[in-house]
Image (cartoon, grey):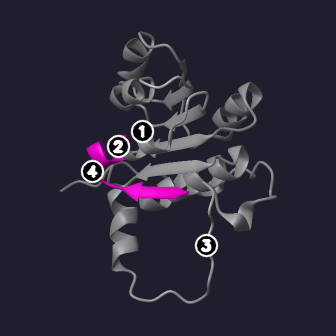
Amino acid sequence: MIKLCYDVNDYRRQISEVLSDGDTVIELGCHTGNTSKVILENDVSLIAIDNSPEAKKEMDKLDLIFINADVRLHDTLSEVFNLIQGCDVLAIDLGGGYHPDTVFKVFYIWSSTFKPKHTVIRNRGLVEFYNSVSEVSGDYKSLDGFLDSYKDSGIPPQIKEFDLWTPMPKK
């Protein structure tokens, strides 16, 4: 199941709803660990990844594997894949509301690699897109935490578009 929201409290609630004891969770965009703490209220294994300078000090206080790296980089994906080859839950919170294209690309490469049962994504742009769609042609639906169209693709190749990443738009 793939869940999508923008409100951080909804995001944390949705993650809690899909967690089961013994799950392996990958959290992309953990920042200083507020959502990680919610995840760790359950008996789970958590790998959290973030490249912000504030993250390491706070994440080192928690009982998890923390990787201080950019989730857009193929090397980061490979590093996590060397630790685990699958996960039960993939949680993605990258920038909250910006860069829905990048969030979708990150979802694509991580979910098609790790084949989670559940993915929860927090991103305003994706929610806005979803809520703005007036018509869908075709009957495509995935019931897992990844898209069926990428089911047997293996680890995706490095996505060159990530080189085009831009900073947060200025007002």
Residue 7 - label: 4
Distance of label 2 from label 4 (alpha carbons): 10 Å
Sequence-first disc among 2 and 4:
4
Magenta stretch: give its range.
1-12
Which residue is disc 2 drawn over?
13
Instruction: Say whether residue 14 is left or right of residue 43.
Output: left
Q: Earlier in the sequence, mark 1 or mark 4?
A: 4
Circle 4 packing at 10 Å, graded few (<14), some (14-19), many (20+), is: some
Please, what is the three-letter code of the amino acid marked with disc 4?
Asp
In the rendered structure, which amino acid carries the disc numbered 3? Lys
Residue sitting at x 42%, y 27% = 36
Distance from label 1 to label 4 (Cα)? 14 Å
Q: What secondary structure is marked by label 1? A: helix
Q: Residue furthest left?
A: 171
Mark 1 crowdedness (10 Å alpha carbons): few <14, some 14-19, many ≥20: some
Identify the disc placed on residue 141: 3
Please indicate, yes or no, whether residue 64 appears anywhere in the rendered image: yes
Task: Tell me the CA gap for discs 1 and 2.
Answer: 5 Å
| Labels 1 & 2 near each other (Cβ < 8 A) | yes
Report the residue marked by disc 1.
Answer: 16
Residue, far front: 21
